[in-house]
Amino acid sequence: MLKAVARHLLHYHRWYLSLGVAVTLALLPHRQSQAPNRHLEEVRERDFLAVVSRNTPTSYYEGRRGPTGFEYELARRFADHLGVSLSMETKSDIAGVREAVASGAGDLGAAALTLAPGSPDLNFSTAILELQPQVVYRRGLPPVETIEDLVGLKIATIRDSGIGDVLRALQKTLPELGWREAAELEVADLLQRVEEGELDAAVIFSHQFKLNRLFFPGVEDGLTLGDPLSMVWAFPAAYGLGLQREANAFLSRLRRSGTLGRLVERYFGHEDYLEYVGARTFIRQLHEKLDDYDELFREAARETGFDWKLLAALGYQESHWEPRATSPTGVRGLMMLTNATAAEMDVANRLDPAQSIDGGARYLRKTMDRLQEEIQGDDRLWMALAAYNVGLGHLYDAQKIAEMRGGDPYAWPDVREALPLLQNRAWYSKVRHGYARGGEPVVYVRNIRRYYEILNYVDRSQQQFFQLSERDDDEERDDSPQYDQIPPIL
């Protein structure tokens, strides 16, 4: 409550200051040199850092473990460094973030902002990350390999991202080049429009395409444009350089220690872990690994009422049955439990296969029990698995979207169609929990169903084999009593 009141007073105080900033600066021409740390001191006095961001996969969103995103992670660490709590506010577009920070409504802007030296109301941090503009285009079109290949194509990019400046520079030597800049769209929106044919191509940053390409197989990567741009944080210019300088020192320490590089690798340096592994690979690992854990899956199934093969399929999707697996986002163990889930399920050691399988099975059961009673049959299982991956809050949001689209919020096929829409601002802005990588749980559930079907087939085949083997053994014993054992079939 106190922090909410303080935040309200901060906004009022800064609104008041912004009205008279020109007069103030005229009366106090040396304000920044006289009190260069005032902004920093103010943040520490009120005990929270107000960060303005955007609800996007590369900046800030609600994930499986709670708030996440590359810039959220950096901002949280910066707040910890300052010894204050973190307050996050989101805007719908980049211009909104810049305006909020410039007016003093936020201490810091962190939303994949690029360096804009001509902004008199903003100061910027040192570079955090290099952002490489890249052309992506619809599969089936002629390859886009040169700038000239862009002429005549319907192209779009995100306004105020910095890419428009790159395109304008190219237009000086290629006047025929044309494009549209849209403030109301996000990366997933652009990729969807390219895939569906509304656009021929889009220009986004390469790491953004890497995070989204699994869900848009009809989009190809093309040439890169220009030199990389610098991702930076923005600060209100009217409040001195103290907080900016502290942020630069903080980022410098992260860079020297290697922490910044590890965060970049965690969020942007790996291929999507949900990419489907072929049935042949799964069957090979089934024969090589499952025997080590099948009794643990059976025991967990007896305790929770699930089919043990379903739990085994879930474990394979999570870790490929690797008990010491660790994801780029920090979840660990055979069932890839988060710290919070492990604590909730009283799992002391996430790397112990028995504890991990038991905890994961109980968590799936708990998740399933929290679903609405209207969800019946297999739909209930598939939705529980989707929630295991993306979180119940985002599943509820997808149900709401399914209902808004005239579908059945209690039927998996309709919710499955709605989940990817959580990547599109036009939809996630209408629901409670905001952006989610909604395509992931769709792929996740599909994979588990495939693995489960294979395990069922193998299990049935083994049962038939053993029944046949027992019958043959009995007949062989009757005919040849001198043999006590029959050699195993390899």
Image (cartoon, rainbow, N blue to C red):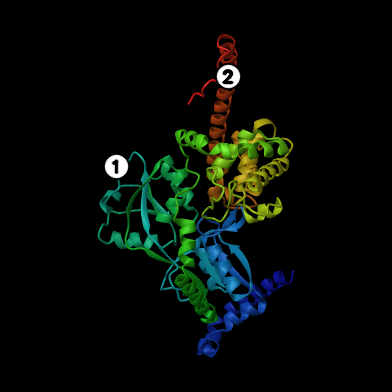
Q: Nearer the viewer, residue 374 or 106?
A: 374
| Residue for point 69% across, 55% down | 343
Q: Secondary structure at mark 2?
A: loop
Residue 286: image location, x then y, percent: 52, 35
Q: Nearer the viewer, residue 330 or 82?
A: 330
Q: Nearer the viewer, residue 81 or 210?
A: 81
Residue 227: image location, x then y, percent: 33, 63
Residue 183: image location, x then y, percent: 48, 57
The amino acid beneath tag 1 is Pro
Q: Secondary structure at mark 1?
A: loop
User: In the visual, does 301 lie left or right of 30?
Assistant: right
Say whether disc 1 or disc 2 marks the residue closer to the N-terminus.
1
On-image quarter of the N terminus: bottom right
Q: What's the CA distance linking mark 1 and mark 2?
A: 70 Å
Q: Nearer the viewer, mark 1 or mark 2?
A: 2
Residue under label 2: 484
Label of residue 142 in the image: 1
The amino acid beneath tag 2 is Asp
